């Protein structure tokens, strides 16, 4: 895909992206209104220690710092018409790790509140790319890193919640990721 087309797609995703309807900081509850995309609202409860920050990349709806020391983030994405299957996205994520030392910790599919969920957790040497969608983008190996990703499939589109960072940080947050997933509700 050429860079001009990616720029146009990024602009459209940002300009059409759902806006935050409400952030109840007292309860650390995030509610995302995607009514512009003719659907309901995905609602979930965030762990109290996670802090919302300004979105720094074009395709993101929201982002949260889950560990202030390492600045590890959780990024939230929404696509009305997802390209590829859930497994094709997971295969792409697997290839973002060096094959010699990657280890799949968890890959599970289940339903929460009638929402099909897939959880993916991998550790190893992460090949960081400033543009992971561009296979020719330069990659920086980051040893002892992990990725934890959640995919929620709804009738109107697919939600991706994705975090990567030092393995110790991601590992320490695993119970918070589980709580996040178990709080999903579609309204």
Image (cartoon, rainbow, N blue to C red):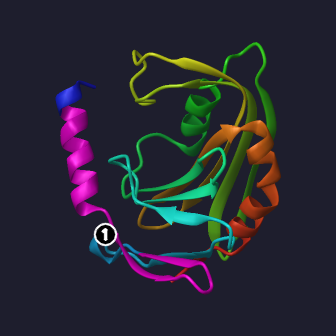
Judge whether 157 appears above or below 148 on screen.
Answer: below
Q: Residue at x 68, y 75 (%)?
A: 183
Residue found 73% across the figure and 71% down from its top: 182
Q: Most extreme residue toward the front, as rendered? A: 69
Q: In this view, does 171 lie above or below 135?
A: below
- Viewer-side residue, 186 vs 178: 178
Q: Is residue 179 visible?
A: yes
Which residue is located at x 72 percent, y 60 percent? Answer: 177
Placement of 151 over or under 183, stated as above or below: above
> What residue lies at 17% left-to-right and 30% top-to-bottom?
4
In x, y percent, where is residue 50? 63, 65
Q: Position of residue 67 (x, y in %)?
A: 67, 53
Residue at the spot of label 1 = 37
Toward the viewer: 57 or 115?
Answer: 57
Asked whether residue 14 is drawn in magenta, I would say yes
174 lies left or right of 120: right
**2 sits to left or right of 145:** left
User: In x, y percent, where is residue 117?
Assistant: 65, 59
Quarter of the figure with residue 96 = top right
Query: Could you classify mark 1 by the number of other residues whose Cα lies within 10 Å: few (under 14), some (14-19), or many (20 or more)?
Result: some
Determine whether the residue tagged by mark 1 lies in a helix, strand or loop: helix
Segment colored magenta: 5-32
Q: Does the magenta stretch include residue 81?
A: no
Quadrant where the N terminus sits is: top left
Residue 146 at x, y = what percent? Answer: 71, 36
Say if residue 107 shows up in the picture. no
């Amino acid at each position: 895909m050429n860079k001009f087309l990616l720029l146009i797609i990024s602009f459209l995703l940002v300009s059409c992206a759902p806006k935050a309807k409400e952030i109840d900081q007292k309860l650390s509850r995030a509610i995302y209104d995607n009514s512009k995309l003719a659907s309901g609202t995905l609602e979930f409860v965030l762990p109290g220690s996670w802090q919302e920050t300004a979105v720094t990349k074009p395709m993101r709806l929201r982002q949260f710092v889950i560990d202030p020391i390492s600045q590890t983030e959780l990024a939230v994405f929404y696509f009305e018409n997802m390209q590829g299957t859930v497994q094709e996205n997971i295969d792409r994520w697997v290839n973002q790790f060096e094959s010699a030392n990657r280890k799949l910790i968890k890959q599970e599919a289940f339903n929460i509140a009638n929402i099909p969920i897939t959880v993916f957790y991998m550790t190893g040497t992460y090949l960081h790319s400033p543009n992971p969608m561009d296979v020719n983008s330069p990659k920086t190996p980051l040893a002892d890193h992990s990725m934890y990703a959640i995919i929620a499939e709804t009738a109107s589109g697919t939600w991706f919640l994705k975090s990567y960072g030092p393995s110790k940080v991601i590992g320490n947050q695993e119970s918070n990721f589980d709580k996040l997933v178990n709080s999903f509700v579609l309204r």
